[in-house]
Amino acid sequence: MSDHQSTPNRPDNGRVVKRLLLVVVGMFGFGFALVPLYEVFCEITGFNGRTSNEAAAVNTRAVDTSRSINVQFITRVNQGMPWDFQPEVKMVRVHPGETKVVNFLVENRTGNNMVAQAIPSVSPGEAGLYLNKTECFCFEQQPLAAGDTTAMPMQFYLDPEIPAHIHTLTLQYTLYDITANATPDVLATMLAN
Amino acid sequence: MSSAAGTMDHHDHDHHHHAPSGITRWLFTTNHKDIGSMYLWFSFIMFLLGGSMALVIRAELFQPGLQLVDPHFFNQMTTVHGLIMVFGAVMPAFTGLANWMVPMMIGAPDMALPRMNNWSFWILPFAFAILLASLFMEGGGPAFGWTFYAPLSTTYSSDSTALFVFSVHIMGISSIMGAINVIVTIMNMRAPGMTYMKMPLFVWTWFITAFLLIAVMPVLAGAVTMVLTDKYFGTSFFDAAGGGDPVMFQHIFWFFGHPEVYIMILPSFGIVSAIIPAFSRKPLFGYASMVYATAAIAGLSFLVWAHHMFTTGMPVAAALFFMYCTMLISVPTGVKVFNWVATMWRGSISFETPMLFALAFVILFTIGGFSGLMLAITPVDFQYHDTYFVVAHFHYVLVSGAIFSIMAAAYYWLPKWTGHMYNETLAKWHFWCSLISVNVLFFPMHFVGLAGMPRRIPDYALQFADINQIVSIGAFAFGLSQLIFLAVVVKCVRGGEKAPAKPWEGATGLEWTVPSPAPYHTFDTPPEVK
């Protein structure tokens, strides 16, 4: 075996192994790097129907009254989530640049104080890039005492740049029970009220 | 397959090798032939075990309604069948073949890293012991499909999921070590004159496969680790409520998963490229194009993963990109099929069992490739997705593709491994029984799939009953046919007609220059390759 390894002009085994191990470690890291990369990718392309988790700047755009777009609302609760969750209206018709407020009604039908988190999804995905929410209940965790009801507002406008082929967009919210993982100050606020 | 036991006593080199006997010989061996044999036996045992699980599935599906097993156990069978066949049967079989053949084909005395070689084999039985033990835990074993999509594997999985994760970790480490060993061996241990473009195609395809392995197995390890922390440690990689995304799981998984399916087919291309020229008595047509086609397939495999997830919804531009990239793979694959056919053209062909399996591989793998092209077409994929059509497709490429090529390889090199010729009559029985039953088993699945029968469901609509009965009969026939293979191999190991150094008239390559059975140590002095 040793006469093979001493053949000149060939890298020794240790060096090749080290390089290959570096690739292995790098690819393991790359697997995890895919998580933030995917976030960024979805944010930029609107892939997967993401919308921004942060409030958009207040609307200063001119309203484009030449066209109207249907914005539909769908609500659902995650499996095992006992709240009632409905949009006040199923659909609004807006001009690009026009600001609208839509309320979503929730009822905590249990005997426990709970905290919920709403996750939005827009279809078609590219429309998500032009949906600007200046205020949304989905930006924060939503506490609700046992048996309570409330209306959660969502204020939005569509960017006038929205492509002409989009006539309808659907905004879906899924409500998740996050009572177990809610941040302590949300719970504290809720108990204080 | 385990041959060297008898030969090491009478090989005449006085080596520094003091062979232990009994079980310790196998536990401590660093010999590439011993380790190759262990890999091959291990993979065969796993093949029978995973096959029995498939038979549980087919027995349940023999009739509509729930008869034999409850749905949760059915799900565990589909899951563990897939995991065992992918990680326990096909991949170790290829690693076993690489261990046996790569050093002999390039004129090396052994693998470059023999101790690591021992480790990479011996952690495998532990991985599968853990996986199989999880089936007996309270709540059952993994039941979320071998693809372990979140949230099935996180929110809705049984408590034994940690065992699944650790077993996949160990399988991954084993594959990575095996791949590193193959790469280092090929880069550093080639005999003088054995340039890269003189290497046999089996060596080339394994070389490329090994790079795929070290590129994607760590990503799989990352994916299972994220499942582990999501389930047990409160992270939210795939949990939308916590800011994660379940669809991202599919992206990460298939980024591993698609190169993985080529890991399971590229070495087959190498095997078939050795066998078809040997029995056509002509050199391989288009050697260089074969090498480039293999590299092209490997490269493209990183750009097509989302064709597994068209139905998750994606922008049209993305769907088109993945569709065209997927279809593009059929070009280098077509080059290969053309080259095999051109190799046979006007050759003087004889039909010994390895050649029969290789021919069946070319035809049946091509059928699997065509159904793959159908699945690549985004709009129609919405109809085929998650139906038995998909099951038919990947079983054509993996059973009548990968596994047929492994059997072809076993018949082709058995005389070299054991020093005996196998029983040709029995082997032909094995071939014809397998060929007929594999088609009875998988071909009708295309039809029920197109008609809408979903995969991974223990019950089905009544109109699928007749075809499912035919499929189940094919399954049992195919399973039992493999016992003939076991008989052939056992008979061949025990005795039989003495094999010459080169039992196949048209075979080429360094492995045929050493006696049969191959001595425990080969190429202590490197051969000169011209």
Image: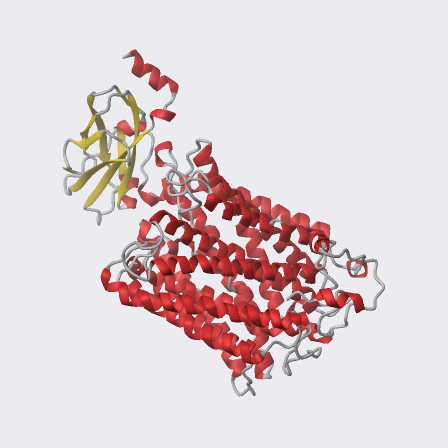
Instruction: Give the residue at x 59% y 70%.
Output: B489
Where does residue B370 sit, x and y in percent of width and height? 39, 69
Of residues B74 and B351, the one drawn nearer to the viewer in this rendering: B74
Residue B201 in view: no
Instruction: Give the residue at x 62% y 55%.
Output: B178
**Coloring scheme of the render?**
secondary structure
Q: Residue furthest front?
A: B68
Of residues A30 and B168, the one drawn nearer to the viewer in this rendering: B168
Where does residue B77 sit, x and y in percent of width and height? 42, 52
- Please state the total of marks drawn on the protein image: 0
Of residues B20 and B333, the one drawn nearer to the viewer in this rendering: B20
Question: Which quarter of the figure has residue A127?
Answer: top left
Question: Which quarter of the figure has residue A63?
Answer: top left
Q: Is residue B459 left or right of residue B249?
A: left
Q: Is residue B69 left or right of residue B267?
A: left
Q: In the figure, B14 relative to A62: above or below? A: below
Instruction: Give the residue at x 32% y 25%.
Output: A141
